Amino acid sequence: MKQFDKKKFEKKVKVMTIIWITFMLLYIGFSISSKFIDYEKFIPEKYFSFVLGVIMGLLMVCIVRIAPYIRAKNQGKLEEMFIKENDERDILINNKAGGLAMSIVILTLLFAAIVSLLFNETVFFALLFADIFVALIKTILYLYYSKHF
């Protein structure tokens, strides 16, 4: 187990907070700009609402992910958060379930599906279902390994 270094972990908390706030501002900016920019030239109306839904979902993920960093103000919360982030069991389960690589694949497939909306509906649905399948596999693996480790 890593030793708790308050200064180092506080810096990490600040950096992660800034990263999540930046993502939130990007998503909010896109949502607001959709009122002023005519995206229908690029994306048909029926799919634009899907894209906005994905963006709102990502915004909710940002809010959920940033909440612990905002709450970690005092020493006790910081130590508790440090212990949770460095729990070897959770790290092992996450790595066994695909870890960061699988998350990158899921986000890349989602991005590719949204971009493919500009070109072909069939490709969009193929990429979307591939993305759903990969996310489902990661979830099943995470649940499986959390019961066995």
Image (tube, rainbow, N blue to C red):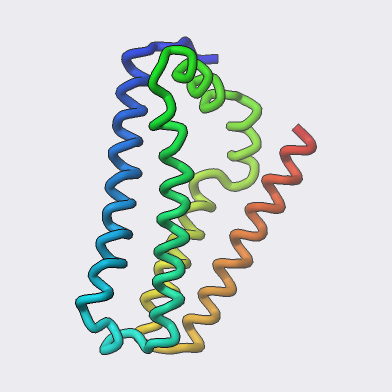
Residue 120, position in %: x, y?
A: 42, 89
Residue farthest left in this picture: 36
47 is higher (above) or lower (below) than 73: below
Residue 100 coordinates in the image, percent (x, y): 49, 45
Count of all numbered marks drawn on residues in the image: 0
Q: Residue at x 45, y 67 (%)?
A: 54
- x 43%, y 12%: residue: 75
Where residue 34 sits, quadrant-wise, is bottom left
- The front one of 16 and 31 is 31
The residue lying furthest to the right in this view is 148
Question: On screen, 18 above or below 132?
Answer: above
Could you tell me which quadrant the N terminus lies in? Answer: top right
Q: Indicate the quadrant containing the C terminus: top left, top right, bottom left or bottom right.
A: top right
Q: Is residue 64 left or right of residue 19?
A: right
Task: Please determine whether, in this image, residue 14 is positioned above or below residue 94.
Answer: above
Tell me where residue 97 appears, x and y as whole percent: 63, 45
Q: Is residue 99 left or right of residue 46?
A: right
Residue 84, percent across and down? 56, 25
Q: Kindly identify the residue that appears in the image at 48 percent across and 84 percent down.
A: 123
Residue found 42% across the figure and 48% down from its top = 62
Q: What is the quadrant of residue 107 in the picture?
A: bottom left
